[in-house]
Image: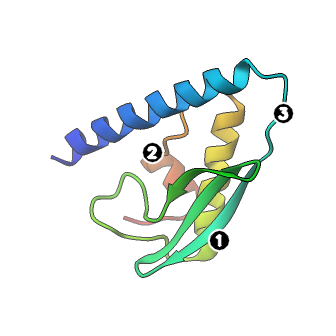
Amino acid sequence: MIKLRFAALLLIVASLSLSCTAKHSRSKEWVQLRVEPLESSVGWGYEIFAGEKLYIKQDKIPVVGGSQGFKTKQQAVEAGQMVIDKLKKGQSPALDSDDLRKVSVQF
């Protein structure tokens, strides 16, 4: 069940990423990406902004089932920065369990 949800989420994120990438690639403008921490009732998350526009809102840890937030603000910001790094490389912004381990997320 979790694998099916993850696959569906990856498909949605990939399609959004491709449509947003295509839109920006036609433009000659550079868009600044930044991560902002987001505190919620389940812990910490992050928001990714493209310029002043909200691009990604992640209020819980991706890949992990349920609604578990990051334990610290720093973990959330580091995970968000990984997403930005992936976007800059033209990769899918989806994080996997190996990415989360790099920011000391235990699940």
30 left or right, relative to 104:
right
Q: What residue type is disc 3 on? A: Trp
Q: Which of marks 2 and 3 is in front?
A: 3
The local crowd at label 1, few if under 14, some if 14 to 19, many if 20 or more residues have their Cα within 10 Å, is some
Instruction: Give the secondary structure at mark 2.
Output: loop
Cα distance, mark 1 to mark 3? 27 Å
Disc 3 on helix, strand or loop? loop
Query: Which residue lies at the image location 64% right of the left edge and 37% below the top edge?
Result: 86
Q: Residues within 10 Å of mark 2 (few under 14, many from 20)?
A: few
- Which quarter of the picture shows residue 66? bottom left
The answer to whether 95 is drawn above or below residue 73 in the figure is above
Q: Quadrant of residue 68?
A: bottom left
Q: Where is residue 73 in the image (x, y as percent from the top left)?
A: 61, 75
Q: Which residue lies furthest to the top in this view?
A: 26
Nearer to the camera, 6 or 57: 57
Looking at the rendered structure, which numbered label has been put on residue 31?
none
Q: How many labels does the image show?
A: 3
The kind of residue tagged 2 is Asp
- What is the CA distance from the residue labelled 2 to the residue labelled 3? 27 Å
Quick check: 67 left or right of 70? left
Q: Residue at x 84, y 29 (%)?
A: 29
Residue beneath disc 2: 96
Q: Residue at x 21, y 48 (%)?
A: 2
Mark 1 or 3, nearer chain start: 3
Above-or-below relation of 72 to 26: below
Q: How crowded is mark 3: few (under 14 residues within 10 Å), some or many (20 or more)?
A: few
Q: Can you give x and y, in whole percent of width and height, for residue 74 in the image?
A: 65, 71
Which residue position is annotated with label 3?
A: 30
Farthest residue to the right: give it: 29
Q: Mark 1 points at which residue?
A: 74
Q: Distance between the residues labelled 2 and 1?
A: 18 Å
Q: Tell me where residue 96 appears, x and y as whole percent.
A: 45, 45
